[in-house]
């Protein structure tokens, strides 16, 4: 049985969070869970978010394999019974006794997490990164989400010349003096990944913005045309500054258009000659379309993929996801990621699950004669940390 528990972790895709010192059991469940809906979601559909409905939401959140894994690992960490009440009580006691920074830092260290590469476009308003660094006690490397910048510029009511110049200048400033190590886009959430290379035309951006301004922010297809152009423009800035570009693919929250998030939709754009120098990271490996991302990382030389969100939120499927990505993806093009957020507990549980799942998947490859035990350990070091360090130029 392979054991990677002592290996360091660089989390290539996650989010900063703010301190939440004391939580009730239900509040904690809402913070650490993935999916399951919310009271606001029910109300928006005309449903009554009464006590019974809220109890139903809590049950759904607690009934996933991910949540059960999280609770078992935290119960071991705190040496308490594996119940939500016992875990939350132990959490709150620890924070009250030692302070939030000590608590959060201890969990990150227990998971051997050394670096967090964070998309600071979530949550909004943006988390103060200096304060976050002080609380978690590990290296924090920020990425600029272009959609936050786009929303700011759309609200500024400026014309195309000023808009495009400000867009380029703010990206340049972020990647030089701003401390950002790359860009991130969630265009898959907004208008989908079917982006034509011809969208790079400056005229497409100008005409689209004029239509949006004339339609007072609506603009129909012009919204997609503008976002597609700005996505292409961001690729060019990444090439200019030799910065990686993370692109959301695959699963997300309930708002995601899953069919428009398939990695395969990006293929024409990724292999476009003018964009071949850009280093792309396909976030979530497109799960549940992760075989597509693994294939693309195989046939195109500047494509990486991370195993976040499928890990930890797909729970016991993590081993299968890793194994299926490695069917085609080169070992040097796969990175650990979690997409965790809100509180430190999921970061810790994800690191544990990632190491266990990776050990199980690589153990089968050892058993089947595809690699030696030594090669499996070297592979784990690459996926858990070293590939991300190389991609982002970290020490």
Image (cartoon, rainbow, N blue to C red):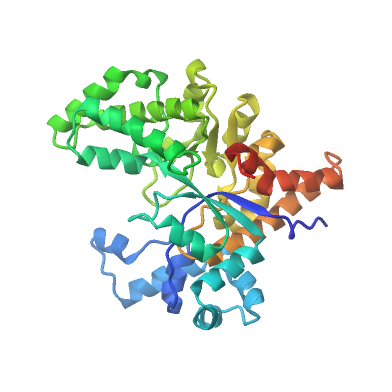
2 left or right, relative to 356: right
Q: Height in image: 132 above or below 393?
A: below
Split into 4 quadrants, where in the image is the N terminus?
bottom right
99 left or right, relative to 5: left
283 left or right, relative to 110: left
| Residue at the farthest front position | 177
Residue 26: x and y in percent read: 42, 75
Residue 75: x and y in percent read: 62, 76
At horizontal 38% and vertical 17% (from top left) the residue drawn is 198
At horizontal 65% and vertical 74% (from top left) the residue drawn is 77
Depth check, front residue: 103 or 273: 103
Depth check, front residue: 181 or 380: 181
Can residue 291 be seen here? The reply is no
Task: Classify residue 291 by image quadrant.
Answer: top right
At horizontal 29% and vertical 32% (from top left) the residue drawn is 166
Residue 261: x and y in percent read: 45, 38
Q: Height in image: 292 above or below 339?
A: above
Can residue 182 be seen here? The reply is yes
229 left or right, relative to 389: left
Task: Classify residue 387 by image quadrant.
Answer: top right
At horizontal 45% and vertical 72% (from top left) the residue drawn is 28
Split into 4 quadrants, where in the image is the C terminus?
top right
């Amino acid at each position: 049985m392979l054991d990677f528990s002592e290996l360091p972790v660089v989390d290539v895709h996650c989010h900063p969070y703010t301190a939440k010192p004391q939580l009730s059991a239900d509040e904690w469940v809402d913070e650490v869970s993935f999916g399951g809906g919310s009271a606001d979601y029910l109300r928006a559909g005309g449903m009554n978010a009464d006590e019974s409905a809220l109890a139903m939401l809590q049950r759904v959140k607690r009934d996933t394999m991910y949540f059960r894994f999280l609770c078992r690992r935290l119960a071991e960490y705190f040496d308490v019974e594996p119940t939500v009440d016992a875990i939350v009580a132990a959490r709150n006691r620890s924070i009250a006794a030692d302070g939030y920074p000590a608590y959060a830092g201890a969990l990150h260290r227990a998971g051997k997490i050394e670096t967090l590469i964070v998309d600071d476009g979530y949550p909004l308003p943006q988390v103060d990164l200096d304060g976050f660094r002080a609380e978690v006690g590990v290296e924090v490397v920020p990425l600029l989400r272009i959609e936050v910048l786009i929303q700011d510029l759309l609200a500024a009511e400026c014309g195309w010349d000023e808009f495009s110049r400000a867009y380029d200048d703010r990206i340049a400033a972020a990647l030089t003096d701003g401390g950002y190590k790359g860009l991130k886009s969630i265009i898959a959430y907004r208008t989908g990944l079917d982006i034509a290379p011809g969208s790079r035309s400056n005229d497409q951006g100008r005409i689209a913005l004029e239509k949006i301004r004339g339609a007072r922010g609506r603009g129909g297809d012009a919204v997609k045309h503008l976002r597609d152009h700005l996505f292409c423009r961001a690729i060019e800035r990444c090439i200019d500054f030799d910065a990686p570009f993370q692109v959301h693919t695959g699963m997300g929250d309930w708002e995601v258009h899953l069919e428009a998030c398939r990695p395969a939709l990006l293929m024409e754009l990724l292999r476009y000659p003018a964009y071949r120098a850009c280093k792309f990271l396909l976030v979530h490996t497109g799960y549940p379309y992760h075989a597509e991302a693994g294939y693309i990382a195989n046939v195109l030389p500047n494509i990486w993929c991370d195993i976040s969100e499928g890990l930890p939120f797909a729970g016991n499927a993590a081993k299968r996801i890793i194994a299926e990505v490695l069917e085609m993806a080169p070992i040097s093009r796969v990175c650990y990621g979690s997409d965790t957020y809100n509180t430190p507990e999921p970061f810790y549980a994800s690191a544990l699950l990632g190491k266990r799942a990776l050990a199980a998947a690589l153990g089968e490859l050892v058993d089947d004669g595809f690699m030696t035990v030594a090669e499996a350990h070297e592979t784990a070091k690459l996926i858990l940390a070293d590939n991300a360090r190389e991609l982002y130029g970290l020490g």
